[in-house]
Image (cartoon, helix red, strand yellow):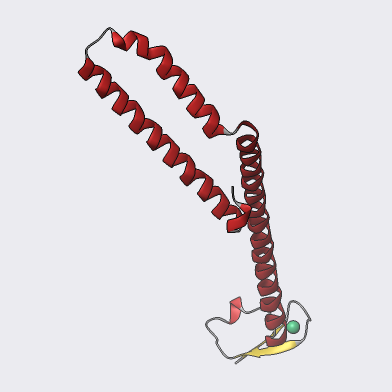
Amino acid sequence: MITKNCKRCNNPFNTWSSKGAEYINYCPQCENIKKNTKRVKTSTSKFENDILSLENRMKSLEEKVENLNSNIEMMTKIQIDNVLSNFLNGKLEELFPKLEKQNKIQQDTFFVKIQSQIVTISNRMIELEKDIADWLGLDENERN
Ligand SMILES: [Zn+2]
């Protein structure tokens, strides 16, 4: 048994381990205080990190909502599907006179291809609008 003076409170204390005695510089009470202080510091910095990461997640979430809102506003304003179908119809009218010079099979193939593309685009738009509505948690009657 070795008696040492605590480096923190300067009180004498006994250490039972002769091998580790030279490394033990604090009495049991001060050792506990030291450990607790370290624990509080660790959990405080962990807490601060958690807050920071939550703040970052909130920020990116807010940005996503902002982007979605402006996308929805834009979609409502220009009625994307109307614009799209007008555009495609215009293109068809523009292209059809040219196609009339070619044979019937090519015309049909082209028409079927364009029709299926319109259906694909239109389905994607519906899915996209549904995804955005789901994401924003809109009720069925709030959707258009
Ligand atoms: Zn002490």
Residue positioned 62% across, 41% down in the render: 72
Residue positioned 66% across, 91% down in the render: 14
- Give coordinates of residue 45: x percent, y percent: 67, 63
Q: Quadrant of residue 71?
A: top right
Residue positioned 36% across, 9% down in the render: 97
- Give coordinates of residue 57: x percent, y percent: 62, 54
In this view, 76 is above or below 103: below
Q: Nearer the viewer, residue 25 or 116?
A: 116
Q: State the count of labels.
A: 0
In this view, 43 is above or below 138: below
Q: Nearer the viewer, residue 112 or 70?
A: 112
- Give coordinates of residue 138: x percent, y percent: 61, 56
- Give coordinates of residue 55: x percent, y percent: 68, 55
Q: Is residue 8 left or right of residue 28?
A: right
In this view, 86 is above or below 129: above
Q: Nearer the viewer, residue 125 or 42?
A: 125
Indicate the quadrant containing the N terminus: top left, top right, bottom left or bottom right. Answer: bottom right
Q: Quadrant of residue 67?
A: top right
Q: Quadrant of residue 100?
A: top left
Using the rendered image of the protein, determine whether residue 137 is visible from the camera's viewpoint. Answer: no
Question: Where ligand 1 lies, by image quadrant?
Answer: bottom right
Using the rendered image of the protein, determine whether residue 87 is visible from the camera's viewpoint. Answer: yes
Residue positioned 50% across, 44% down in the render: 128
